[in-house]
Image (tube, helix red, strand yellow):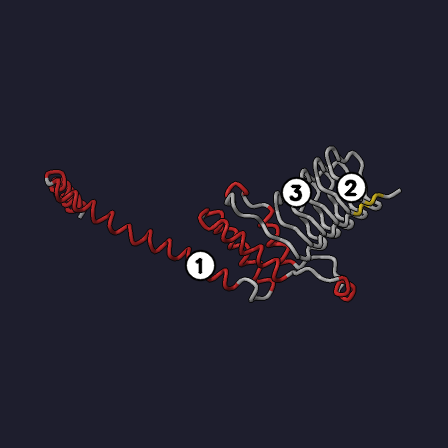
Amino acid sequence: MLTVIINAYSYMKSILLNDDSLLSKLFLKIVVAQKPVKTTHHKSVKQRLKVRIEQLGNNPRETSLTIIHDLEQIAQDHPQYHWLIIDTLTTFVRENSPYMLQLELISNPLAKVPTDIQAALAVIVRRDAKKDPKDKQLDLSHTDMRGANLNSANLEDTNLYLANLSEANLSGANLKGAILSAANLCGANLAGANLEGAILSAANLEKANLSGANLYQANLYLASLHEAILDNAIFDGANIREAKFSE
């Protein structure tokens, strides 16, 4: 049996080597056969992404966590979908954790973000910002992120207007150029955070920890910093006109 196999192999090898056209045709067939596989794979990823986006927010929190993890994986494996996924997650946060008025806060004193919102935020702040389009901006304005863990977050140039970040952990975060006008940062941990050029006009920074924070050229007009911890904070070139400090 082995002899038959060897003889058959030798016969086919001699045919292929002596007939270049047959070899070319065989190679062409292999290439053509591969193309539908690549197309199918692309379509499957696109369909998977479409389904995941449609599912996000319409399932129990446990399921949403799985969906968010899957979206992050797609963004990492397929850079062409990076911004679509990041923008989808920021929209998810805005729609499912909107800013609360003071009366609503009194009736709903929960100081921790839901697990799926925290998971979405974690993906957003640890993304590869180099893949962000230059003409796009993260939009987390009008959101309730009380108590969120955003340690070492990359939120440079992010729109955080009227966001509630009270008691949030933003230690070591990059908030350079971020828009934080009217944001609530009461009791937030901003130790070592980079707030260079950030807009903090009318922001509530009462009891916030700003030790070692960089506020170079930040705009703190009308900001409240009562009882804030300011040890070694840098205020060079900052606008502190009518800002309120503890006596």
Q: Is residue 62 left or right of residue 191?
A: left
Query: Which residue is outermost to the right?
Result: 247
Three-letter amino acid code at disc 2? Arg
* Label 2 element class: loop
Q: Residue at x 84, y 45 (%)?
A: 227
Which image quadrant for residue 23?
top left
Name the residue nearer the viewer: 8 or 141.
141
Which image quadrant for residue 109?
bottom right
Mark nearer the N terminus (1 vs 3): 1
Three-letter amino acid code at disc 1? Arg
Mark nearer the N terminus (2 vs 3): 3
Which residue corresponds to mark 3?
Answer: 175
Where does the image place residue 162, in percent across and percent down from the top left?
69, 54
Which residue corresponds to mark 2?
Answer: 241
Q: Is residue 169 left or right of residue 12?
A: right
Does residue 176 lie above or below 105 as drawn?
above
Q: Is residue 95 left or right of residue 200?
A: left
Q: Residue at x 63, y 57 (%)?
A: 117
Which image quadrant for residue 245?
top right
